[in-house]
Amino acid sequence: MLVDHHCHLDFPEFASDLAGVVARAKSAGVGTLVTISTRIRAFDQIRAIVERFPDVWCSVGTHPHNADEERGIPTSEIVALSRHPKVVAIGEAGLDYHYKNGTPAAQAEGFRAHIAAARETGLPLEIHTRDADTDTLAILEDEHRKGAFPAVLHCYTGGRELALRAVDLGLYVSFSGVISFKKTEALQEIARDVPLDRILVETDAPFLAPAPHRGKMNEPAYVVHTAAALARIRDLTEGEIARATTANFFRLYTRARPPAPTEAVAE
């Protein structure tokens, strides 16, 4: 079995065929999905999805692109929403300087509020970081001095220093279909060197479809291709990658539960 710990099932691309998307994931051997919140104020949409599908879980949080729009939401509100039994993570939150959506100050403020929520609840923080390695690492190290918190660097495309230092701080690193793209040798080297017990795989669907589907709309079933790419990079079997990343997921996402035996998907 595989897990897609980061997809966006509430996005409009999936609205017309949501049941089909979930069914195709199960048929592909992806037994557990986590649909990730990007706007706290839209959490009702996420909640409706996870209450509809037994093996779909969710997070609660504000994407850095929306940091100004939702600036000032306190940690206490994030914690309160996280009490829903299908919420298994906080976020996604972090820093993104690539598109310049969301001011750096609002992003940093939100990032720290979400870290505090992860620390208080024990739920892992889904960290979004793009073109912001230095500031992301500075915040992670500063916040870690205040107390440890569970987290994963999702859809990792940053540099080697941030990835390995994050592992030293107890974090996990997640790889998406980007590692299946050509000319990503530096990222593939990072994926080879991060300890196997700290790696997750994801789609970030509907974005970043892996080869052989690059350029098409991504969906959770395609995480099998990311896992296959990771197996090639690390010279392991696909089964070994599936077992390791699934075990890592349930170790980190302690509130999530494996599929019921009658619904379990063969590896």
Image (spheres, rainbow, N blue to C red):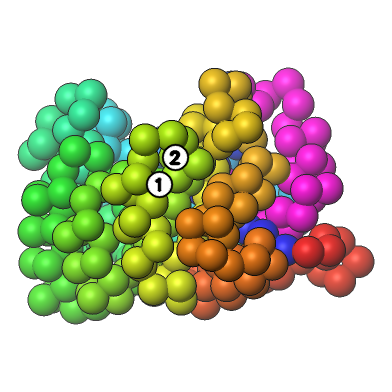
Residue at horizontal 79%, vertical 40%?
24
Would residue 194 be seen by someone viewing this image from the given angle?
yes
Question: What number is the disc on residue 20?
Answer: none
**Residue 119: % across, % down:** 29, 71
**Residue 186: % across, % down:** 29, 48
Would residue 128 be seen by someone viewing this image from the given angle?
no
- Please indicate whether residue 101 sits to the left or right of residue 45 in the image: left
* Magenta-colored stretch includes residue 29: yes
Looking at the rendered structure, the secondary structure element under dot 2 is: helix
Cβ atoms under marks 1 and 2 closer than 8 Å: yes
Q: CA distance from mark 1 to mark 2?
A: 8 Å
**Residue 83: % across, % down:** 49, 63
CA neighbours of label 1 inside 10 A, class few (<14), some (14 to 19), many (20+): many
Magenta region's main secondary structure?
helix
CA neighbours of label 2 inside 10 A, class few (<14), some (14 to 19), many (20+): many
Residue type at tag 1: Cys
Looking at the rendered structure, the secondary structure element under dot 1 is: loop
Residue at horizontal 16%, vertical 43%?
132
**Residue 75: % across, % down:** 27, 57
